[in-house]
Image (cartoon, helix red, strand yellow):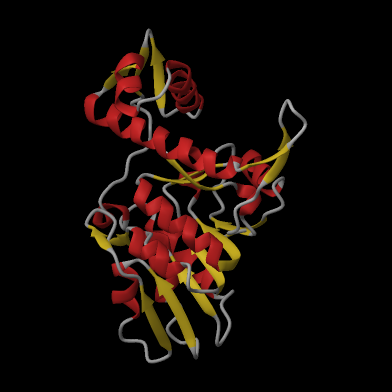
Amino acid sequence: MGEMKREVAENHTGESRVEEPLQEGMMAEERRMQILQILRSEGRAKVNELVRRFNTSAVTIRSDLNELDQRGLVQRSHGGAVIQDTVFRESPVHERIKSQSKEKQRIGAMAATLVREGETIILDSGTTTLEVARHLKNIPHLQVITNGVNIAAELLGSRNTQIIMMGGTVRNDSASIVGRATEDMLEQFSADKLFLCGAGCDPDFGVSGTNLEETMANRAMLRAAREIIVVADASKFSKRSMSLIASFSEVDMVISDVSLLPELQERIRSFGCKLILV
């Protein structure tokens, strides 16, 4: 999953050339996220202004704005775009802990039952994965890889658990560690399972995050894990955030709560995901 896919195509002379669409797609996605950050900061942006900022063509910028508009992240306007007020934004971690707390507790307890003695797992820095961590302390010989300061603090007193903490820059809002050092360190590990939260879980878009650096760390976690498990309460399935972490076709299992709408349940299962409701 972590290897760059290449396609061989023929040019007009019949000679073979190597294209790297995945790499180009990642570059385009990063540009779109930067455009979104500009819009969030300034409220609106014109195509000609963005052309100058990114030193690219108007056709490319219009394509980026159209894509962001289709995702519901911005609203296209004459000659540019404005920020879409309905886009989900990140709340500080101390506020998110209070939201859907009973559902998160049930999800965390269920997720912990999937972890076996001696396994290596990855927990991202979310508040639902914090509930997973709280139920792991009696599992012997467990290795937990995390970029969550909150996760490490929760597991600190457990004699059964070896905590492997990522290095990098701490984000105060999410109590997470991000940056190139985080991503490089994650590339050195292999894990049995990843438990992933995400800020939004729109089936049509995928599991998404509010911060590009954190999203990049989450993508590195995906590459390190053999099984991907999304832990998210039902409220997240009506939200999409700015930066894609993973499509549901990459996810093995989803654990949510019983209030998840039947049509969303069916949509999630259509991707081949196992769905557990608690």
Residue 43 at what x, y percent from top left? 26, 23
Horizontal relation, residue 19 to residue 97: left or right: right
Residue 197 at what x, y percent from top left? 46, 56
Report whether residue 261 is seen: no
Taking the spot 46% from the left edge, 82% from the top edge, the residue there is 143
Residue 239 at what x, y percent from top left? 46, 39
Report whether residue 24 is seen: yes
Q: Where 165 sits versus 39, above or below?
A: below
Q: In the image shown, does 25 or 253 lie closer to the viewer?
A: 25
The quarter of the displayed image where residue 12 is located: top right
Taking the spot 43% from the left edge, 74% from the top edge, the residue there is 145
Residue 238 at what x, y percent from top left? 49, 38
Horizontal relation, residue 230 to residue 48: left or right: right
Taking the spot 33% from the left edge, 26% from the top edge, the residue there is 85
Q: In the image shown, does 95 or 163 lie closer to the viewer?
A: 163
Q: Where 118 sits versus 120, above or below?
A: below
The quarter of the displayed image where residue 176 is located: bottom left
